[in-house]
Amino acid sequence: MISNKLTENTPKLEKATTVSRRRIRICHECDLVLALPALKNGEKADCPRCTHTLVRRQRNAAERSFALALASVIMLGLSLSFPFLGFSVKGIGNGIELSQTASTLVGFHQPLVAICVLLTVLVLPFLYLSALSWLCIGILQGKLLPHSRLIARTLAYVTPWMMVDVFVIGTLVSLIKIVGMAEVELGLSFWTLCGYALLLLLTTQSVDRDWLWQAIDSEPKAPEGIILGQSGAPQGLVGCHTCGLVNKIVAKGRCRRCEEPLHPYKGPNTQATLALLVAALIMYLPANLYPIMITTSLGSTEPSTILKGVLLFFQSGDWPIAVIIFTASILVPVGKMLALLWLCWVVHQQQQQPLNRLKKVRLYRVTEFIGRWSMVDVFVVAIMVALIRTGSLMSIAPGPAALAFTAVVILTMWAAILFDPRSIWQPTPAVPNNELPSSLPKENHHV
Ligand SMILES: [Zn+2]
Ligand SMILES: [Zn+2]
């Protein structure tokens, strides 16, 4: 992938006044108004102020996304058709299929955790892949299939909640846990699951929203009198979070192209993020105080909290797995909540803070990226419970902390999604002239 950072290798426009009003974008993360350069396949354009990737051009985008989505669906179908994992102790064994990792939890009175596993690993990815295939077929035929616009609008809402890659890591952790106490057998479904996770990742990366919306609907011109190189909100402009089109700010406004509600920047608003963080902090207490798994072995019942599970791994010398569980279950949720709380506080401060704006926005991106990996512990519980159901030698049941911890992960992810990174850049710093892309005028310029 060739990086086209706007500041370098951008084709120079002969005159600044030739900037097309169909190539103007507003960065979602810092609200900077800029003009996209002409991009070749394989190139991407990053925001010169906050480095957020604005567009990423793919070669044969529709064919590529369709092929990857189709391959992912086939892998998903195979993963559901064959045995997933098997284990046996002294000849007494048990084998499970992938769907049983969710359905077994229902039998242990954990329907909400079961729904979360089902949604994040099977249902949402399947809906996403079907929706993308639907769109690509229409685009390739040159005639959109029914409801394509509505489907394209929902894609972005589904993406953060697909966690097949995290589930694969959860499976590996479960295997390491079980290897010490039983013989484990990997079914064909385990290998197809790995393929499904990889293909799903490639599929989501192949979708460039900017390209997708240009293929679905032609782009209306941006409003007149736009000043490039400055923030959009003071000019009464807002970039659509779904299709990228520049719109004028009006009360309860919707995008002119995709009809999604617009979210203009109106100053730092951290109430929703803080409310969700407080809820997550409250749920974090039962998540750690109550047992997450209850193991019954040879008549003795042993409840195990998250911290106890980590300590057991350390004591038995499995420190790499202890480090993974400690990072995913303790370090990441706590670090994420503290980072978001700090960002919520810092955007209301006027004076100079220890971190500059770029470092703050990077901290935000890290919290947004790592949040979903905390689900590893929930998936480990789901897999262990399904695999070692009530048996004569040993049984594992989910504890009350499983639901509380799932709630912590979802609430913190939601809090991060609702945090508006544009507030990090306010009051807006002027972009130094030497940092503006060559396609932009060196002084404030009206288009
Ligand atoms: Zn930006
Ligand atoms: Zn839009």
Image: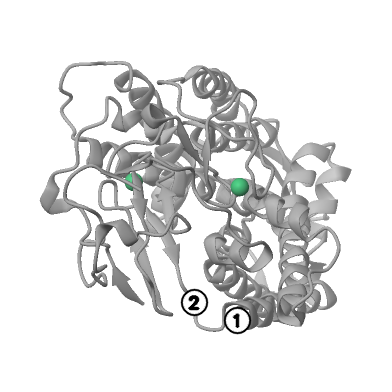
Q: How many marks?
A: 2
Spot occupied by residue 197 in the image (x, y as percentages of width and height)? 61, 69
Tell me: 188 left or right of 32: right
Spot occupied by residue 328 in the image (x, y as percentages of width and height)? 47, 46
- Residue 383 image-quadrant placement: bottom right
Q: Which amino acid type is marked by label 2?
A: Gln
Spot occupied by residue 442 in the image (x, y as percentages of width and height)? 16, 50
Mark closer to the chain start, 1 or 2:
2
Q: Which amino acid type is marked by label 1?
A: Arg
Spot occupied by residue 227 in the image (x, y as percentages of width and height)? 32, 41
Q: Say which of 185 and 326 sits in front.
A: 326
Crowding at mark 1 (Cα within 10 Å: few <14, some 14-19, many 20+):
some
In this rendering, is residue 232 above or below 82?
above
Distance between the alpha carbons at the discs numbered 1 and 2: 8 Å
Q: Say which of 45 and 393 sits in front.
A: 45
Residue at which label 2 appears: 58
Q: Residue at x 33, y 61 (%)?
A: 18
Crowding at mark 2 (Cα within 10 Å: few <14, some 14-19, many 20+):
many
Tell me: 325 left or right of 129: left
Residue 88 visible (yes or no): no
Query: Is disc 1 in contact with disc 2, using a CB cutoff of under 8 Å?
Result: yes
Residue at which label 1 appears: 64
